[in-house]
Amino acid sequence: MHKTLFGAALLLAAPAFAASEPSGAAQTMAPWVPTMTQWRRDLHQHPELSNQERRTAKFVAAELKKFGYTVRTGIAHTGVTGVLKGGKPGPRLAIRADMDGLPVTEEVDLPFASKARGEYLGKPVGIMHACGHDAHVAMTLGVAQALAQRRNELAGDVMFIFQPAEEGAPPGEEGGAPLMVKEGVFKDFRPDAIFGMHVVSALPVGVVALRAGGAMASSDTFRIVVHGKQSHGATPWKGVDPIVTAAEIVTAAQTIVSRELDINHEPAVLTFGIFDGGSRFNIVPDKAELQGTVRAFDEGMRQHALASLRNIAEHVAAAHGATVEAQVPLSADSSNPVNYNDPALTARVRASLETALGKDRVREAQRWTASEDFPQLGQAIQVPSVYFFVGATPAGTDPATAPTNHSPHFFLDEGALAVGSAGMLQAALDYLGAAR
């Protein structure tokens, strides 16, 4: 199947705008599609895990320097920025792309499939761009080149941010957008707005989608350790059972979303992903551990859910004579805020996307309960941001059944490169007041 899709991708890349009259941005990007495709395939063959994107960072920095950008490297381990000063005074814009791959062994039959191997959590793993960050880097470099060619037309300045560790830093390390902020990514360039984009299997190639307000959920990781008293499984009354206690915490926590949060207002999710306790069938252990995630689109609902989870854990444990260590959330570094699209700026970007691609190719995005650290950039300096989605699933394939982002079968139709780059270029040109 994937060999057929690969051939279709090559055919689709060129006529990505066949249904609409190409805009100036689409025409500008068209000559760069083959180069972006080459970049993307090279990056796809050489994915790197979070905080290890050394080859990718070197590649990005070299290209930005060729384009005439002022380049800074080594931010948050491997992060790269490039700044271009426009020919006229005006606002400052930042455009961000993420660079890291995932500990996933690729199972897509492509001539440029990843064979990379690495280590994650002490175990050997395959590495794959299973979330499309290779495409983000390629598209964003294409936009950087196009803007450099039109430098004199730009009424304002632009900074490109190539960010490591969007998927999360390894345990015990800092990384991603929070560390870039901490290490002064904006110390010499404070943007007035920040744009970002992401390829998704949930949309067909040729279209983009965005929504004002909460586009992606906040995410908070939690860890709850229940401490009981160990005893023989034949005499449980002589101990305090942390497994039974933890099970009741899991059950009681289900009422937070179903009975406490007003889901007429916004949706929310509470998921337990780890339940770890005991080592032998006939021993009541001394502790059990729970881990999971809370997702929300409203800050008040987010804080209510976290507080209620802590309250339930503490009181259920007390009712069983156990104690609890509730790290809810686990840490600041394990949390991401709501990916919130500023409504006024979203309206401007939507108009730009419609100019670049045609109104028929710009859709209203559904909320997505996945999360991103992208909003931490804008929140750190209190500037508006917009984040839109680029369809990646080939024509003829139902996006509802296509392998999802993070799957070993995730397949990106390379027609997405022309679509995403043209949309982002038009948004940047319009924001910086360049002539079309």
Image (cartoon, rainbow, N blue to C red):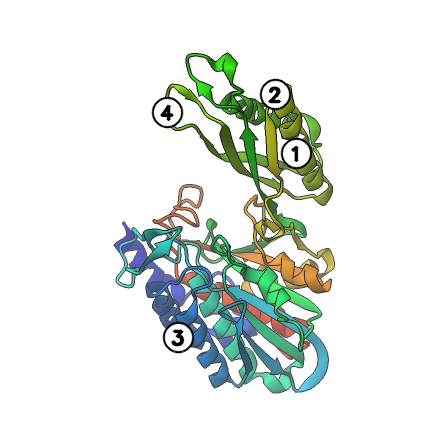
User: For numbered disc 3, what is the local secondary structure?
Assistant: helix
Query: Residue 328 location, x and y as percent?
Result: 62, 40
Estimate the spatial distance between the alpha carbons at disc 3 and disc 1, rounded to whole Å: 51 Å
| Residue placed most toward the observer, 105 or 240 | 240
Estimate the spatial distance between the alpha carbons at disc 3 and disc 2, rounded to whole Å: 65 Å
Q: Which residue is mark 1?
A: 310
Q: Report the side of 366 relative to 187 (left or right).
A: left
Q: Which residue is mark 2?
A: 321
Q: Which residue is mark 4?
A: 280
Tell which tag, 3 or 2, sits nearer the viewer.
Answer: 2
Q: Report the side of 310 relative to 125 (left or right).
A: right
Q: Is residue 303 above or below residue 284?
A: below
Estimate the spatial distance between the alpha carbons at disc 1 and disc 2, rounded to whole Å: 17 Å
User: For numbered disc 2, what is the local secondary structure?
Assistant: loop
Hey, what amino acid is under mark 2? Gly
Q: Which residue is mark 3?
A: 35
Q: Mark 4: give few (<14), some (14-19) or many (20+) Cα within 10 Å.
A: few
Of marks 3 and 1, which one's residue comes earlier in the chain? 3
Residue 197, image quadrant: bottom right
Tell which tag, 1 or 2, sits nearer the viewer.
Answer: 2
Hey, what amino acid is under mark 3? Thr
Hey, what amino acid is under mark 4? Arg
Of marks 1 and 4, which one's residue comes earlier in the chain? 4
Q: Is residue 385 above or below residue 189?
A: above
Of marks 3 and 4, which one's residue comes earlier in the chain? 3
Q: Are marks 2 and 4 in contact (CB under 8 Å)?
A: no
Tell which tag, 1 or 4, sits nearer the viewer.
Answer: 4
Query: Residue 372 location, x and y as percent?
Result: 56, 53
